[in-house]
Image (cartoon, grey):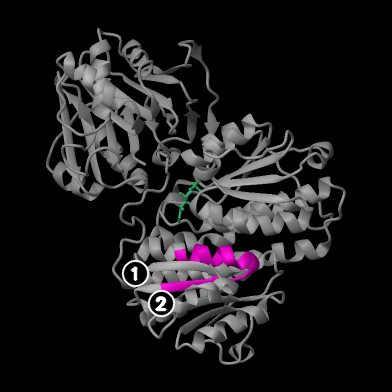
C-alpha cells in the first residue's frame, strides 16, 4: 500500500530513488513520483501509471541534487492521477511529503487549514500533512513534524523534506505502516521495506510506532513518541539482493514458484532434528506449563495467509489435540472473541504489515493470549508485537500473488504442531518427520513439470468461471487455487468443500464450467471421486489433482494432474503447487499483468 523511499548522500539521488521504487512497486502502482531539491527549488516529477511511465518522463532531465524522496502509490483518497500522485507540496511550495497510510481525521483538518487560508489542489489526505507541517515549520523540521503528528489520527508512514532547512535533511514519522532506515557508507536511506535498500546496505533500523527519524549527511537520529532521543537496534539482514531479482524468469511469480523447494528446506533447516525428533526455534520458546495451559489456539490472518491458517487447523488439532479457531483479522478485531488467559494466538503474515492481522493480534493480546507470529519479514510489525516468532525464511516475495510464502507458512504451522506436541509430552514419531524431509524434492518434481501446465492453460484460458473443490485440509487448497486464478487472471473462480456441492453450486455445472478437483490421500478420496462423477454426469469438465494414475479415477476426470504422495497432513503443500502453476499459465495466456494485477498491492497496511 504505497512505497516510500528517501536518499541522502553523495550520490546522484534520482537513479537510487527510481531503483528503490522499482523494488517497492509491488506495494502499489497507480502512479509514481520523485522530488529533489536543486538550486533552491523543489524539482518534482510525477506520472500516472506504473513506474516505467515516470522513468520515461525523467529521461533527458538532469536533476543533480544530494537528496530526495520517491513514492509509488496505491490509491486510497482520490483517483490515480498526476494531480493526486506523490510527492505533494504544501500550499506555499516550501516542502514536499510522501506518505503511505490513511489520515482518518483529514476532513476536519482540511477544513480547518482551508479556513486558515491553506489551499489544496489534490483529493488526497496527504496534502493535509504537507500543509500542517508547513504551518508548524519555522526552521526546525523535526519539531514541525512532531507537532503535526500530534494532530494526526490514523495510520501513516511519511517523509518530508523542506527547502528552508539549514542543511539537507529528511524527517520521517511512523505510526502503523513500516518505515525502515538504512545506513550506508556516508549515506542514509529510508524506505517502506528493506528490499528497497538491499542493493546498498544490509544494516537497517526498523522504526517503532510513534518514532520520528531525521536523516542528515552526518547520520540519523530517532526520537520516540514522547520526544525522547532513542537508539533502535541495527538489524543485519541476511537476504541476498539477488533473491529480489527475477533471475531469468519472465515473472517474479514464476521465479517464486520455482524457489519453493529451497524455501521449504530453509524453513525447516536447523529446526528439526530428524534423528531425535527434537523441534526448536530461535525466537519462539514456550514452556511445557505454558503449552499445557493453552485452552485454544487462535490463528489470525488475511487472504492467502488465512488459507494457510485453515490448513494449519487440521495440522495443529491432529498433532496437539488442542482446539483451533481460525479467523480473518478483519472479522476478529470487530467481534468480541472468546479468549482465555494463556490461550495461544498466532498471527500469520508474509509481510508482517497487514493492518487487520496486526489489530486482531492486539485484540487477542488484550484478552490475555500469548502471541506468536509466523512471518517472512524480519523485524516487521507482527514480529515486534509477538512474544515469539517463527520466521518462514522464504526470502523476499515480490509477486503480488503469494506462492512460496504460503507453502512455507504451512511448513511453519506443521513444525509448530510438532513443537507443541513435544511440549505436551507426546512423542514426535518418525512417521511425522519422514515426509517433511522429502517435501522439497516432491515439490521440485511438480515444478519440473511446468510445461504441462502451459499446455493445460491452452485449453482453459478462455473459460469465464471455475469451480475448485476439495475436502478436509484440501478444501483450503481449493480456496487458494481459486484465489490465485482470480487475482492474476481476473477469471471468476470459487472454492468449495466438495461435499457441499450438492447443496447449491451443482446447479452451476454445465459443459462450460471447468471444475478443479483435489483427490489425494485415503481419508476422503472416494468421496471426492463421487463428487467428480456428479460433475461429469452433468457435462462438467473435471481437472483432477491426484496422487493416483488416471485409471484409479475411473473416468472421473477429463484432465489429470499427477502429484507425488506424502502424508495426509503435508499433502496440501504439494497439492497447491500445480494450482499455482495453472493459475500462472492461464494468466500469461490471457496476457495479464501477472506480478502486478489490477487493484491489488502486496502489503495491505490499511483496514
Ligand atoms: C494473495 C495474497 C494476499 C495476502 C494477504 C495477507 O495472493 O498475497 O491475499 O495473503 O493480503 O498478506 P500477509 O500475508 O502479508 O499478511
Q: Secondary structure at mark 2?
A: helix
Residue visible at 41% across and 79% down? 513
The reply to whether residue 173 is in sight is: yes
Q: What residue would you read off at disc 2?
A: 454
Q: Is residue 11 above or below residue 247?
A: above
Provide residue 108's location: percent of width, then percent of height: 28, 22
Per the rendered image, the range of residues in magenta is 466-482
Q: Quadrant of the C terminus?
A: top left
Task: In the displayed orientation, state which residue is furthest to the left.
Answer: 60
The alpha-carbon separation of the residues under discs 2 and 1 comes to 9 Å
Indicate yes or no whether the magenta region holds residue 471: yes
Check if mark 2's residue and mark 1's residue have beta carbons within 8 Å. Answer: yes
The majority secondary structure of the magenta stretch comes to helix
Q: Would you identify the image quadrant in which residue 98 lies?
A: top left
Could you tell whether 461 is left or right of 573 in the image?
left
Q: Is 507 within the magenta?
A: no
Residue 8 vertical position relative to residue 570 in the rendered view, above or below: above
- Looking at the rendered structure, the secondary structure element under dot 1 is helix
Give the number of the disc on residue 275. Answer: none
11 left or right, relative to 308: left
Q: Check the image and name the residue furthest to the top.
A: 138
Question: x, y percentage for residue 55?
Answer: 20, 46
Give the residue pinned by disc 1: 588
Dividing the picture into quarters, in which one does residue 255 lie? Answer: bottom left
Q: Residues within 10 Å of mark 2 (few under 14, many from 20)?
A: some
Observer-nearest of 323 and 430: 323
Q: Position of residue 524 (x, y in %)?
A: 68, 75
Q: Foreground: 238 or 446? A: 446
N-term mark: 2 or 1: 2
Residue drawn where x is 73% and y is 52% of the image:
417
54 sits left or right of 481 in the view:
left
Amino acid at each position: 500500500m504505497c512505497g516510500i523511499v528517501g536518499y541522502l548522500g553523495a550520490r546522484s539521488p534520482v537513479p537510487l530513488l527510481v531503483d528503490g521504487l522499482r523494488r517497492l512497486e509491488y506495494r502499489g502502482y497507480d502512479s509514481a513520483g520523485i522530488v529533489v531539491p536543486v538550486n533552491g527549488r523543489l524539482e518534482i516529477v510525477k506520472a500516472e501509471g506504473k513506474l516505467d511511465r515516470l522513468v520515461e518522463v525523467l529521461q533527458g532531465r538532469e536533476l543533480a541534487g544530494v537528496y530526495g524522496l520517491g513514492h509509488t502509490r496505491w490509491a486510497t483518497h482520490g483517483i490515480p492521477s498526476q494531480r493526486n500522485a506523490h510527492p505533494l507540496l504544501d500550499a506555499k511550495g516550501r516542502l514536499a511529503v510522501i506518505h503511505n497510510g490513511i489520515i482518518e481525521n483529514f476532513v476536519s483538518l482540511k477544513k480547518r487549514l482551508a479556513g486558515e487560508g491553506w489551499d489544496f489542489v489534490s483529493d488526497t489526505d496527504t496534502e493535509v500533512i504537507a500543509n500542517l507541517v508547513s504551518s508548524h515549520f519555522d526552521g526546525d523540521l523535526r519539531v514541525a513534524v512532531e507537532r503535526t503528528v500530534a494532530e494526526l489520527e490514523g495510520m501513516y508512514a511519511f517523509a518530508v523534506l523542506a527547502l528552508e532547512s539549514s542543511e539537507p535533511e529528511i524527517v520521517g514519522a511512523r505510526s502503523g505502516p513500516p518505515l525502515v532506515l538504512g545506513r550506508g557508507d556516508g549515506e542514509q536511506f529510508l524506505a517502506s521495506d528493506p528490499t528497497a535498500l538491499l542493493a546498498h546496505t544490509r544494516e537497517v533500523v526498523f522504526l517503532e510506532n510513534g518514532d520520528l527519524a531525521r536523516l542528515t549527511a552526518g547520520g540519523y537520529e530517532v526520537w520516540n513518541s514522547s520526544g525522547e532521543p532513542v537508539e533502535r537496534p541495527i538489524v543485519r539482514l541476511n537476504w541476498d539482493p539477488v533473491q529480489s531479482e527475477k533471475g531469468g524468469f519472465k515473472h517474479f511469480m514464476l521465479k517464486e514458484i520455482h524457489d519453493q523447494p529451497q524455501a521449504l528446506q530453509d524453513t525447516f533447516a536447523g529446526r528439526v532434528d530428524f534423528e531425535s525428533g527434537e523441534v526448536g526455534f530461535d525466537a519462539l520458546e514456550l514452556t511445557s506449563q505454558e503449552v499445557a495451559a493453552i485452552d485454544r489456539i487462535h490463528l489470525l490472518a488475511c487472504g492467502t495467509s488465512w488459507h494457510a491458517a485453515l490448513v494449519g487447523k487440521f495440522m495443529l488439532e491432529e498433532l496437539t489435540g488442542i482446539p483451533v479457531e481460525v479467523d480473518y483479522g478483519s472479522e476478529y478485531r470487530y467481534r468480541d472473541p472468546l479468549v482465555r488467559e494463556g490461550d495461544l494466538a498466532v498471527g500469520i503474515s508474509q509481510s508482517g504489515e497487514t493492518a487487520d492481522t496486526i489489530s486482531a493480534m492486539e485484540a487477542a493480546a488484550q484478552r490475555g493470549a500469548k502471541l506468536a507470529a509466523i512471518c517472512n519479514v524480519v523485524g516487521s510489525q507482527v514480529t515486534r508485537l509477538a512474544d515469539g516468532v517463527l520466521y518462514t525464511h522464504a526470502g523476499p516475495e515480490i509477486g503480488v500473488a503469494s506462492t512460496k510464502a504460503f507453502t512455507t507458512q504451512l511448513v511453519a504451522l506443521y513444525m509448530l504442531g510438532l513443537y507443541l506436541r513435544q511440549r505436551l509430552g507426546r512423542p514426535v514419531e518418525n512417521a511425522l518427520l519422514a515426509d517433511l524431509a522429502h517435501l522439497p524434492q516432491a515439490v521440485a518434481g511438480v515444478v519440473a513439470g511446468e510445461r504441462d501446465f502451459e499446455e493445460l492453460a491452452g485449453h482453459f484460458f478462455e473459460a469465464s468461471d471455475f469451480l475448485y473443490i476439495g475436502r478436509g485440509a484440501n478444501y483450503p487448497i481449493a480456496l487458494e487455487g481459486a484465489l490465485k486464478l482470480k487475482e492474476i487472471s481476473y477469471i471468476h473462480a470459487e472454492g468449495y468443500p466438495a461435499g457441499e456441492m450438492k447443496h447449491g453450486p451443482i446447479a452451476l455445472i454445465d459443459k462450460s464450467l471447468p471444475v478443479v478437483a483435489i483427490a489425494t490421500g485415503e481419508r476422503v478420496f472416494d468421496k471426492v471421486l463421487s463428487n467428480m462423477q456428479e460433475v461429469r454426469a452433468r457435462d462438467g469438465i473435471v481437472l483432477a489433482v491426484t496422487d493416483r494414475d488416471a485409471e484409479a479415477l475411473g473416468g472421473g476426470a477429463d484432465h489429470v494432474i499427477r502429484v507425488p504422495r506424502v502424508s495426509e497432513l503435508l499433502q496440501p503443500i504439494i497439492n497447491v503447487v500445480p494450482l499455482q502453476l495453472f493459475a500462472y499459465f492461464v494468466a500469461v495466456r490471457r496476457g495479464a499483468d501477472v506480478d502486478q494485477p489490477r487493484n491489488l498491492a502486496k502489503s495491505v497496511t490499511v483496514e
